[in-house]
Image: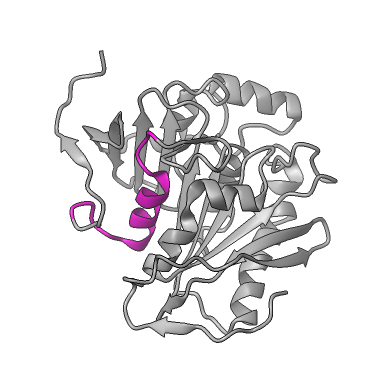
Amino acid sequence: MPGRIAIRRLWGGSATRQFAVEHPLQEGTVSTAFSHLSYKLYLPRRLARKPAIIVMLHGCTQTAQDFATGTDMNRLANRHGFIVIYPQQNLSANMNRCWNWFDRRNQDQSGEPAAIMRMVDDVAEAHDIIPDTVFVAGLSAGGALTAIMGRAYSDRIAGIGIHAGVPAGAAQTVQGAFRAMENGDEGEIGPGPTPAIIFQGDADSTVAPANGDRIAFAPGAPVRRRRLLSGWRWCHRYLIAPVDEHAHAEYWLVRGLGHAWSGGRSLGSYTDPRGPSASREMVRFFLGYSRMAYPWIVIRLFLTRPFR
């Protein structure tokens, strides 16, 4: 575990003027009955008085360092004073470093989800922090595991960000996982009990866009749609109201985006710098900022006609 260090705390939730310097990532490990995982930890120069913890789950073939670089989440942590944990899958558990979301042992409060939540507890204890809120976000296989954790730990996780993921319960075998990714017609419908922000590219040939639709749209939930230009891409942004056992959700369907983190840095793998910044929008969603007050400009056109 990383040792204790002195961290100045902010009285507000934003570390303005502190985002120019990025500290190195610290390292840690956790062990449970079923999993042994390493992780990278990012502590900003200043913490908010009640800091959030955001857990970032990489996709297949990626590492924690690669994902941190590509998503640029550390810079946002410096600005807003939250902590970032980057778990890393072991090659011994999956030769492509995929999270084993399709394994029944990882589809409730055990296995990989339990190890990841143990990281949150260890980091909070090691640095004498009582986290105000915990959020989880992930790409591809990481997004699929995030969907599972949002349902399994709805009492502990305040929000989830799913980027090119599949719904919880979509598969129980490797073969089933490929079918779910390709077809988008398996698994739970709707976001479940945890508020969710979903990003999906309509040109994703690895994870069918129908998966994003299935996660976002709970049956009977009122939906508002807006067409907007963000970054260099047109998007549909859906605001989905809570209904029954489902929390509210926000769904970004990005035109022309493939299997990549939208708005990510090109120094990391599986990123598309031209899209809207998924990292910024997820942080805004998690921390409760309004889009008009958020300090990045997005051009919005309130059009309802479909793409042509």
Nearer the observer, 46 or 207: 46
Name the residue at 14% across, 33% down: 302
Q: In which quadrant will I find the N terminus? A: bottom right
Name the residue at 73% across, 42% down: 97
The answer to whether any part of residue 219 appears in the image is no
The image quarter containing residue 86 is bottom right
Name the residue at 44% across, 74% down: 51
The reply to whether the magenta stretch includes residue 282 is yes
Residue 110 image position (x, y, % from top left): 72, 56
The reply to whether the magenta stretch includes residue 195 is no
Q: Decide if residue 306 is on the left or right side of residue 27.
A: left
Question: Against 175, is 172 above or below?
Answer: below
Q: Decide if residue 263 is on the left or right side of residue 128.
A: left
Name the residue at 50% across, 23% down: 204
Nearer the observer, 249 or 221: 249
The answer to whether any part of residue 302 appears in the image is yes
Q: In which quadrant will I find the C terminus? A: top left
The stretch in magenta equals 274-292
Residue 130 image position (x, y, % from top left): 52, 80
Residue 188 image position (x, y, % from top left): 53, 36
The image quarter containing residue 101 is top right
